[in-house]
Amino acid sequence: METNKEKLLQELKDAKFDPEIIISDDEILKKSIEVKKELAEIKKKKEKIDLEFSNQPLNI
């Protein structure tokens, strides 16, 4: 007789679900923080570029 764990693993395999893909909440939180930091850096760079261009006279 199969144990509950074996039965659940078989159900996951039958559903074409890879149990190795399960992501913990901690991993999601870490990635979210990384993405927010990257976004903040991008915004700073954009603001710097916008400021540089706003100080340039338009040569039309």
Image (tube, rainbow, N blue to C red):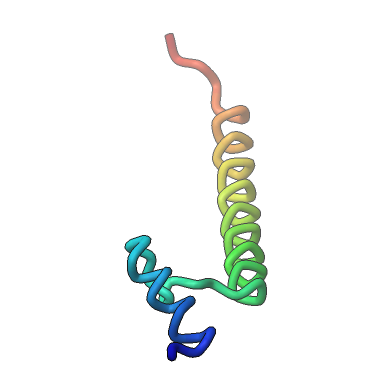
The quarter of the displayed image where residue 59 is located: top left
Residue 51 percent coordinates (x, y): 63, 36
**Residue at the spot x=32%, y=62% of the render?**
16
Give whichever of 21, 8 is nearer the camera.
8
**Residue at the spot x=51%, y=16% of the render?**
58
The quarter of the displayed image where residue 34 is located: bottom right
Look at the picture and state if 47 lies above or below 13: above
Residue 13 percent coordinates (x, y): 34, 70
Locate the C terminus by quadrant: top left
How many numbered badges does the structure rendering display? 0
Q: Is residue 20 left or right of residue 29?
A: left
Look at the picture and state if 28 lies above or below 59: below
Give whichever of 32, 43 is nearer the camera.
32
Look at the picture and state if 42 lies above or below 11: above
**Residue at the spot x=60%, y=56% of the render?**
41
Residue 57 percent coordinates (x, y): 55, 21
The quarter of the displayed image where residue 17 is located: bottom left
Residue 55 percent coordinates (x, y): 61, 30
Locate the N terminus by quadrant: bottom left
Task: Name the outermost residue toward the top.
Answer: 60
